[in-house]
Image (tube, helix red, strand yellow):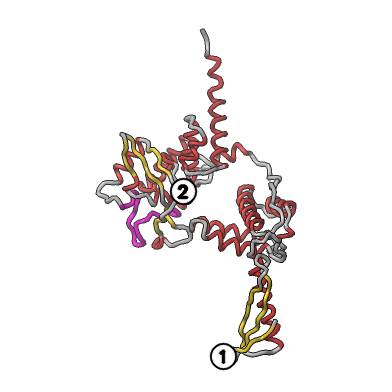
Amino acid sequence: MWTEPTKTGKVKFVEQFKNPLTLKYTRVSITMDKKTNTTRKLAQQTLNKRIEEKLRHLADGQIKEGVTFGELIEEFEVYYQQMVKPSTFAAWKNLKVHILKNFNSDILVSKITNKYLVNMLEAMIYQRGYSNTYVGLIKFKINQLMRYAYRHDYSATPIGQLEINWKRDNSAKKIENKYLDDDEVKQVLEAVRAINPVHADVLLWQYLTGMRIGEILALQIKKVFQENGKWYVKIDCTLDYSYKPKSKYTISSTPKTQSSNRTILLPDKAVRIFRQYCLNKQPNDLLFSIQTKTGIFINPTSINNRLDIIQQELKLDKPLSTHIFRHTHASKLAELGVPVELISKRLGHKDSTITREIYLHVTKKTAARYSGLINHLDV
C-alpha cells in the first residue's frame, strides 16, 4: 500500500490487486484526513476488505475462503428481495430470524457439510421443540442458501439431499387437519355469515375456486368473464398486504409466482356470487370490498382472527384459517376424481407437496369407502 497527496490536503491510501480473470491490476483507494500509524492501519484493513469483496464476486471457479454463513445470508437476502413478491420476502425475514438463532453465523460456508446441516435441523426438532412443518420450511431455505453459495464459489460441492429423521406423528390425522369435511364447511360458513356475510361469501368463493385469499381480495370485476356459455376468472395479481397497515394495501401487478398466472372455470354457485356482488360496480372495482376509514380493501387478518374464535366456539380440532378453504377445494376435486396435475394447475402451483398429500389421502379414503360395493356385483 502507498499514499498519494490530494488537492484538498488529505491523504489517499492506495492498494492494488491482480484480477485473476484478466491478469490486469486494479486499484482501490481510500482518503483519510492525515497520515498516521492509526489511519494507515485503518486504511489497510478497509482496502483489504474491499479487495476481498471484489475478488469474492469474480466467477473464476476458485473457492472464496473466508465467507461466513451470516455474510452469505445477508448477500442472498439482497438477491432474493429482487426475485420475489413482498409477501414472500416478508415470510423469508421471519424464517431468517430462526435460522440465525439456530445456526452459527460465524461458521465458514466452505466448511459447511451435509452432516452439520442435518444435525442442526434435527436439533431444532428434538431439542428446541420446532415442528416438522416449520423445520421443513427452514430446510427448504437452507437448500436455497447453499445452492446460491455453490453458484458463487463459496462452497466447493453442492449440498446433497438432507436426510432428516422427522419426529413421528399421525400422518393421516395431520393431513386431514389441512382441509374441512362437508359438515365442517357448512358449520364454519354459517358461523361466519351470522357475523359478517361478506366475509362468508369470500370464504365460500375460496372454497369454490381454490384461489389464494390475496387473489380474491384483489379481484376486480373485469377479471370475471363469459366465453362460449361458460364463466371464467383471470388471475394475474394479488393483494400486497403483508406487514402493512390496511391503508397501505395495494394490488400487485403480478401474482405470487409465475405459475399463479392462470384462468380457471367458475362453478355455477360462484357465478351467482359474482352476479350478486358486481351490481352497480365498474370494471375496475373490487368484487369484494368493505368501505372503512382505512380504505375499501378487506383485511385478511380480520377474517383469520374471526376464524380463530369460531374454531374455539365450534370446538374444532383443526386450525382454521382462510387457507384451509383452498386446501378443502383441492380435497373436493380429488374426491371427484380430478387428476392431481390439473388440481395443482387450477390452484396455481408449479408443485405442491401438500396438494399431493391431500390428493393421495382423499383418493385412498374414497377407494376404501366404495371398495365394499364390489360385493354387490351379481348376475
Q: Residues within 10 Å of mark 1 (few under 14, many from 20)?
A: few
Does the segment drawn in magenta span residue 287?
yes
The number of callouts visible is 2
Q: Residue furthest top?
A: 379
Q: Residue placed at 56% from the left, 21% from the top?
A: 371
Q: Residue placed at 55% from the left, 26% from the top?
A: 367
Determine whether, in the image, residue 361 is placed left or right of residue 227. right
User: Magenta segment range?
Assistant: 284-302
Q: Which residue is mark 2?
A: 307
Q: Which residue is mark 1?
A: 7
Q: Name the quadrant containing residue 355.
A: top right
Determine whether, in the image, residue 236 is placed left or right of residue 277. right
Between marks 2 and 1, how big is the CA–CA gap?
69 Å
The amino acid sitting under disc 2 is Leu
Does the segment drawn in magenta span residue 143?
no
Q: Residue placed at 69% from the left, 80% from the top?
A: 44
* 288, above or below 154, in the image: above
Of 302 and 64, nearer the camera is: 64
Of 283 and 14, nearer the camera is: 14
Q: Tell us which disc is closer to us: 2 or 1.
A: 1
* 25, above or below 112, in the image: below
Determine whether the residue tagged by mark 1 lies in a helix, strand or loop. Answer: loop
